[in-house]
Image: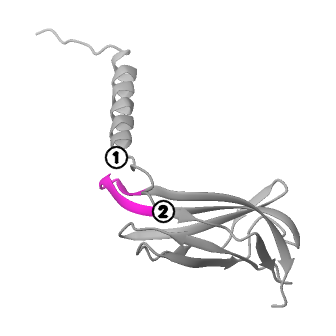
Amino acid sequence: MRVRSTSVRAVPRAAGLLGAALLALLGAAAPAGAAAGDTLTVDPVGTVAPDGTVTLSGTYQCSASGSVFVTSNLRIGQQESNVGDGVRALCDGREHAWASQGKPAQLHAAPGAARVEATLTHLTQGPAWWLPVLPEFLARQGQDISLVASGA
């Protein structure tokens, strides 16, 4: 009986095909995007407390069902950090206010110029057990803001 050996080239080729199939699956499962009426704003002024706690705010409007969150990142100079853990959004087609508060890690927040990048994200069911949720970005907003001192 003759044993046939597997070519060394077959392994990279199989890995490449597996990678292409995975990318095709993820591409097919990618979210369609924001629905008309999904909006997000960032207020032009945020506050910073003496202890470094930052408060950012704005408005959002969405109509997705399920888990939706507003998250915000603060950039001062070349440093960037998230603010808070994200705010749960109520998606009923009406406009709502959001506010996020926290001490940004890895940056020293002080009164002055800053930039906020906010995202309205819907968490959707993933295509398989190994990818349980996928983020669908409903709206994004970048805004140059002024941080002002708060008394708190």
Secondary structure beneath disc 2? loop
- Of 63 and 52, nearer the camera is 63
Q: Is residue 143 above or below residue 100?
A: above
Say which of marks 1 and 2 sits in front.
2
Identify the residue shown where x is 59% and y is 77%: 98
114 with respect to 102 (left or right): right
Give the prevailing secondary structure in the magenta stretch. strand
Crowd tier of the residue under label 2, counting other residues whose Cα lies within 10 Å: few below 14, some 14–19, many 20 or above: many
Residue 11: % across, % down:
36, 22
Residue 58 percent location from the top left of the image: 64, 73
Residue under label 1, please give it: 29
The residue type indicated by label 2 comes to Asp
What residue do we see at 36% from left, 37% from top?
A: 22
Local secondary structure at mark 1: helix
Does the CB distance between marks 1 and 2 fall below 8 Å?
Answer: no
Left or right position of 64 against 151: left
**Mark 1 crowdedness (10 Å alpha carbons): few <14, some 14-19, many ≥20:** some
Specify the segment rendered in magenta.
Answer: 122-134
Q: Position of residue 45 (x, y in %)?
A: 78, 73
Residue at left offset 35%, top offset 69% = 65
Amino acid tagged 1: Ala
Residue drawn where x is 46% and y is 75% of the image:
94
Q: Residue furthest bottom?
A: 152
Q: How is the rendered protein coloured? A: one colour
Residue ID for mark 2: 38
Between the residue at mark 1 and the residue at mark 2, the CA separation in whole angstroms equals 21 Å
